[in-house]
Image (cartoon, helix red, strand yellow):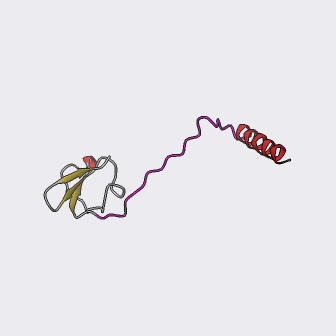
Amino acid sequence: MARSNACCLVLLLLCGALLLEMNPGTMVMSAVACPLVCLDVDYMTCPSTGDEHLSPQCNCCLAPEGCTLHLTDGTSVSCG
């Protein structure tokens, strides 16, 4: 009885995947974790604004892609 229920469940899941046009072999979940750490950023520069010093963001998760965070210790972090 339990085996029959398990087979029915698997069949139902496969049918649902086919109906939703999903290929179970290629279903990949991806997520990017954003750290809850705020760097000591002095200013930010972005390619779209040239050398203009922009208001700093805490980390690259909050900054636009391609921008650079310039830290108060003189180092920099490229985002993107």
Tell me where residue 78 appears, x and y as whole percent.
Answer: 25, 49
Judge whether 41 appears above or below 48 on screen.
below
Residue shown at the point (59%, 40%) measured from the top left: 27
Could you say which quadrant of the image residue 21 lies in? top right
Residue shown at the point (31%, 59%) measured from the top left: 59
Question: Could you tell me what secondary structure mostly forms the magenta stretch?
Answer: loop
Between 2 and 16, the residue placed more toward the observer is: 2
Tell me where residue 65 appears, x and y as whole percent.
Answer: 34, 48
Between 10 and 63, the residue placed more toward the observer is: 10
Residue shown at the point (30%, 49%) measured from the top left: 79
Tell me where residue 14 appears, x and y as whole percent.
Answer: 73, 39
Residue 26 included in the magenta stretch of the image: yes
Question: The magenta stretch spans which residues?
Answer: 20-38
For residue 18, side relative to residue 78 (left or right): right
For residue 34, side relative to residue 44 (left or right): right
Tell me where residue 19 appears, x and y as whole percent.
Answer: 74, 39
Residue 37 included in the magenta stretch of the image: yes
